Amino acid sequence: MKWVRVESKALAAVAYDHDWHHLYLEFRSGDIYCYRDVPIDRYEELLVADSKGKYFRRHILNRYPYQRISRAFPTAS
């Protein structure tokens, strides 16, 4: 799984686990969340969205089960 840094006011980096269909989001606050059962299309659309935060709120938030991950989780930094 590879983290991708993104230009966004809300997000710092995103990653996708193709085997498990998990989308990982690192927010600018440093918080990391794992969203489960996310189709690959959502990940790809998020990467090319003009506003990553707006796309997240409209298409991911409250649509997929999630959990907060420790900040010690390795990211693209």
Image: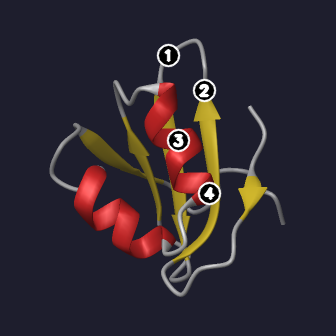
Comparing marks 4 and 3, which lies closer to the viewer? Answer: 4
Q: Position of residue 42 (x, y in %)?
A: 44, 39
The three-letter code of the residue at mark 2 reads Asp
Name the residue that disc number 1 marks: 20
- Residue 39 sits in which quadrant? top left
Q: Which residue is mark 4?
A: 48
Any mark on residue 43, and which? 3
- Secondary structure, mark 4, is helix
- Can residue 75 be seen in this snapshot? no
Label 4 or label 2, whichever comes before in sequence order: 2
**Label 4 packing within 10 angstroms: few (<14), some (14-19), many (20+):** few
Q: Is residue 65 above or below residue 74?
A: above
For the residues labelled 3 and 2, say whether their Cβ atoms are less than 8 Å apart: no
Direction from residue 6 to residue 43 in the image, left or right: left
Report how far apart the C-alphas of labels 4 and 2 lie in the structure. Answer: 18 Å
Percent x, y for residue 20?
50, 16
- Of circles 3 and 1, the one toward us is 3
Cα separation, mark 2 vs mark 1, equals 6 Å
| Label 3 to label 2: alpha-carbon separation | 10 Å
Q: Look at label 3 and name its amino acid.
A: Tyr
Between 37 and 72, the residue placed more toward the observer is 37
Element at label 3: helix
- Residue drawn at (48%, 80%) of the image: 10
**Mark 3 or 2, closer to the camera:** 3
Query: Alpha carbon of mark 4 to alpha carbon of mark 3: how far?
Result: 9 Å
> Which mark is drawn over residue 17?
2
- Which residue is painted at 62% across and 54% down in the image? 47
Q: Quadrant of residue 14?
A: bottom right
Q: How far apart in space, not on screen, are marks 3 and 1 (Cα)?
A: 13 Å
Decide: few, some or many residues near mark 2? Use Cα within 10 Å; few <14, some 14-19, many ≥20. some
Whether tag 2 and tag 1 are in contact, CB under 8 A, the answer is yes
Front disc: 4 or 1: 4
